[in-house]
Structure formats: structure tokens, C-alpha cells
Amino acid sequence: MRTIGAAFTGRDNRFTPIRLALASAVLLEHAIIVTQGPLPPPPMAINAWSLSYAAVNGFFVLSGFLIANSLEHRADPFTYGASRILRLMPALAFLSAVAVFVIGPVATRLPQAEYWTDPQTWTYPVQVLAFLDTSQGPAGIFPDHPWRGEFSATLWTLRYEVIAYIAAAVLFFTPFPWGRSAMLAYFAIANLAYLLLQAVWPDAPALFTSAARLSAAFTLGMAVYLWRDRIPVGPWAALVAIPLWLLLGESPLAELFLNVAIGSLLFWTAFARLGGVPTGSSIPDWSYGIYIWHYPIMQLVLLADREASPFQLALITVPVTAAIAAFSWHCIEKPSLRQKSLLGAALRKPGIVMTLFRRTP
């Protein structure tokens, strides 16, 4: 039986269509959430596990797999760091600038002079680019919306993505163990930390619960990569995990089986031959733009029509977000990624002693 390792030999996979599908799933559920506000239970959920929750976990599983691959192929902290910076920051800087200079002045309840002098207007892009508190937006925006004052509700996950990038680099470039057995141990530790946190501190701050939750998904992806030559392409793990996930209901233990099911289905979809159906690997990757831009577009639609239904919201948001995501990919993200070698070389120039980031032979 063909393994994931045998299938993952080039770029002919469905990772880009999968990322687009995951971003679209988040958009779809947010079309309901943005109109209903925070009080009702999450829509599109099974046993309180919602579609967008599962999609975010899926992003982290894929990210763990691809980051492990990036580390093993680059084996260079400077180029690795440059790639991660250029993947996230340019598009995020563009979003922050549009938030302050374009959308903020239109969406604020404050007089213009007050908007431009309010510290929150200027601290918001700092918060976004430093991966801090992104729960609000420029001063006074969207005052009458169900999610008042919020510019982009998806940005909170990026801080955990950055934490995962750094943690993975520390594991790889330092004397910490790196290999199949070690990665299984890291995966087990992440899941144990999540379960213990839910058991002994169920009302822990989101910083801790989200970090534990998403590290469990990320380390699963890394473990799949390290074990890729032993794992067959197929949905078999999902066929076992899905019934267990359903039986466990809202138990925190269900998260483990949810992630296994997500990972199994994602990698099966990515590498299955499907009778010669094209993989779509060459299509442009608009997923990041869709992910970070759909929420502010929805908030703007509600600003124009407070009574817009979720269907109307999605009908307008999808094409507008796709257009912005296309611009972001072709004009910002893709050109920026071409500079990773240049930035990697620039990061080396100061001659910083990288003893902590040198793997022993």
C-alpha cells in the first residue's frame, strides 16, 4: 500500500485546495456567527464541535506537517525564519494599514478628528503585527454590530501559529530529540497537557487552552511527517476515530479523536489518486487572504445593511473576499516569498552567535 512518504515526493498534492476549503469553511460559519452574536450556541456543530473549530485544527495539522518538512529540507534557522516572516507579515501589514486608513474612518462612530487622535487607532496595527490582542480594531468601529468593535476575529490564531513555528525550530535546531519516537512523545505531551488543563482548570485563560489545543493539532501533523514512510494513504484512521469522537460527545478526550479524523481525511484527500483527477496543486493559494479578510468584509456588509441574513452576507462576502485574497496573493504574498533567500542572507549578516540553533552532527 502506498505510504504518505511515497506520495509526498513533489508538489503534486492537494494541499492548496485543502487550505482553500478550510478557509472557506471558516468563512461559511462566520456568516452565521457575525449576524447572531456571541450568545447562541455555535452553529454548524456536532456535540458543540463546530465546523470552524475543526477547520482551524485542520490548518494546524497541515501546518505541522509542512513545517517539519521545511525544517528537514532547509536545516538553516535564517532561511526558515525568513520564510515564516514573509509568509505572514506582508499580508498582515497590508490588512493593518487598510484597517486604520480605509475601513476605520468609514466604520467608526467617532468624529474624524477624535478617531485619528485616539491611541487605540494606532495601537491596533501594533497589536496585530506583534500577535498580541487582536480582539478589537481601530477606535470606535462597528459600534452597533453583534460583535461590536471587532475588525477580524480570525487573527487570534496567528499568535499560536507563530508560537508553533518557534517551538518547532527550537526542537529541530537545538539538542532536543528529533525523530519518530521523539515526535510521538511531543504529540503525547501536547495532548496530555490539553486534557489535564481541561480537567484541573476548565476556566483557564484562552491563552493556555488555545495553546494546548492547537499544539496538539500541530504536533499531530509533525508526527505524521516523521512517520510518513510508515503511514498508508487512506481514510482508515478516520473510520476508527470518527465513531469514538461521536461517542465521547463534548468530553475533552473527543478532541484527540477529532484531530486524528481530520488528519486522516486531510492527508487521504491530499494524496489519493482519485482516478487521475487533477490535484489542483498549481492553483493560486488565496487561503491566507480569505482567512484574514472575510470577517472585516462581513462587518462592512452589516454596516451597510444591519438586517442582512447569513445567506446575503455570504453572497456578497465570497466574491469580494476572493478578489482581495487574489490581490493579496499575487501582489503581496507571492512576491514577498520570492525574497526569502535575500532576507535569510540579511539575517545572517549581523554575525549573531547561533550556538543554540546549531544541531550537533
Image: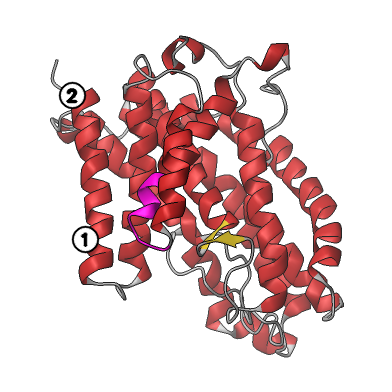
Disc on the earlier residue, 2 or 1: 1
On whether residue 253 falls in the magenta region, the answer is yes
Q: Is 62 rendered above or below residue 42?
A: above
Q: Residue at x 54, y 26 (%)?
A: 268
Residue type at mark 1 is Leu
Residue denoted by label 1: 196
Q: How many marks?
A: 2
Task: Using the rendered image of the protein, determine whether residue 346 is visible from the camera's viewpoint.
Answer: no
Q: Residue at x 75, y 78 (%)?
A: 107
Instruction: Point out the frontmost of discs 2 and 1.
Output: 1
Q: What is the secondary structure assignment of the residue under circle 2?
A: loop
Residue denoted by label 2: 359
Q: Nearer the viewer, residue 93 or 238?
A: 238
Q: Where is residue 358 shown, x and y percent of the image? A: 19, 26
Q: Residue at x 49, y 65 (%)?
A: 126
On whether residue 279 falls in the magenta region, the answer is no
Q: Nearer the viewer, residue 137 or 110?
A: 137
Q: Is 288 rendered above or below residue 263?
A: below
Q: Where is residue 170 shown, x and y percent of the image? A: 24, 38
Q: Is 65 rendered above or below residue 96?
A: above
Task: Using the rendered image of the protein, determine whether residue 291 is visible from the camera's viewpoint.
Answer: yes
Q: Where is residue 4 shown, x and y percent of the image? A: 45, 18
Please give left or right for residue 276 compared with residue 58 in the image: right
Q: Which mark is residue 109?
A: none
Please give left or right for residue 244 compared with residue 198 in the image: right
- Give the residues drawn in magenta, as a range: 250-258
Give the quadrant of residue 52: bottom right
Residue type at mark 2 is Arg
